[in-house]
Image: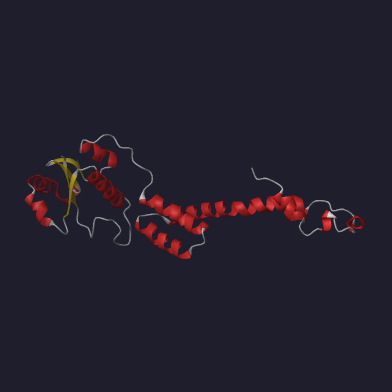
Amino acid sequence: MKNVQVFDPPMCCSTGVCGPAVDPVLPQFSADLNWLKSQDVVVERYSLSQQPGAFVENNVVQAAMSSEGNECLPLVLVDGQIVCRGTYPSREELASFAGLAAHPESIYTDAVAELVAIGAAIASDCRPCFKYHYNRARKVGVSREDMTRAVATAAKVRQMPAEAVFELVKPLLNRTMPNQENCDSDSADCCNPTYFVNSISSKKCC
């Protein structure tokens, strides 16, 4: 069983959502480490701010920092050997380091999930839902521009049923009506209040 160790540079926390700017790399990397754990890989993660002792106790990490300083961080070790330094590897790279079969990276990230939720909130007129997922989207690094595009797409989808109804009704309303003298009988279609309803219901959408 492979052992993966991550030694982070000094920061508030490993989620990447602290502070005024969100680093979108860190939430994705955290998700990738969780995926590694689900593949029965032992994963250990240490922060220089919170667990400096782990850096001092590891000879490999101590040697790298002595020669390169904090510039070598983050360090990723597999079974005690450095496999990546100065940057966070992708899921494919982590899988390769851990000796796992190639695993296609899903495009359905936390950010995508929140954009989908924002669109659903717009389509369903749910204000609390929108506020909740708007805040969640900001935390995982979704830009205002992408949220605006998601809202615009949801608005277009929501508008389609209304446009379809208007397209159905317009030819009925524009239909040439019979002369008034032909509307004297009770059976005249033009004077029947259910005329348009029956006309619509008699047409099949499929």
Furthest toward the right, the residue is 181
Q: Is residue 40 left or right of residue 124?
A: left
Residue drawn at the location 23% of the way across and 36% of the way down:
100
What percent of the width, then of the height, locates residue 87?
A: 24, 45
Residue drawn at the location 83% of the way across and 51% of the way down:
176
Count of numbered labels shown in the rendering: 0
Q: Nearer the viewer, residue 206 or 121?
A: 206
Q: Nearer the viewer, residue 164 or 192?
A: 192
* 104 to 189, vertically: above or below: above
What percent of the width, then of the height, locates residue 19?
A: 29, 62
Colour scheme:
secondary structure
Q: Is residue 39 left or right of residue 181?
A: left
Q: Quadrant of the N terminus?
A: top left
Q: Is residue 87 left or right of residue 142?
A: left
Q: Nearer the viewer, residue 205 or 163?
A: 205
Residue drawn at the location 66% of the way across and 53% of the way down:
165
Q: Is residue 129 left or right of residue 92?
A: right
What percent of the width, then of the height, locates residue 110?
A: 36, 51
* 136 to 41, vertically: above or below: below
Q: Quadrant of the C terminus?
A: top right
Q: Nearer the viewer, residue 119 or 17?
A: 119
Residue drawn at the location 84% of the way across and 53% of the way down:
177
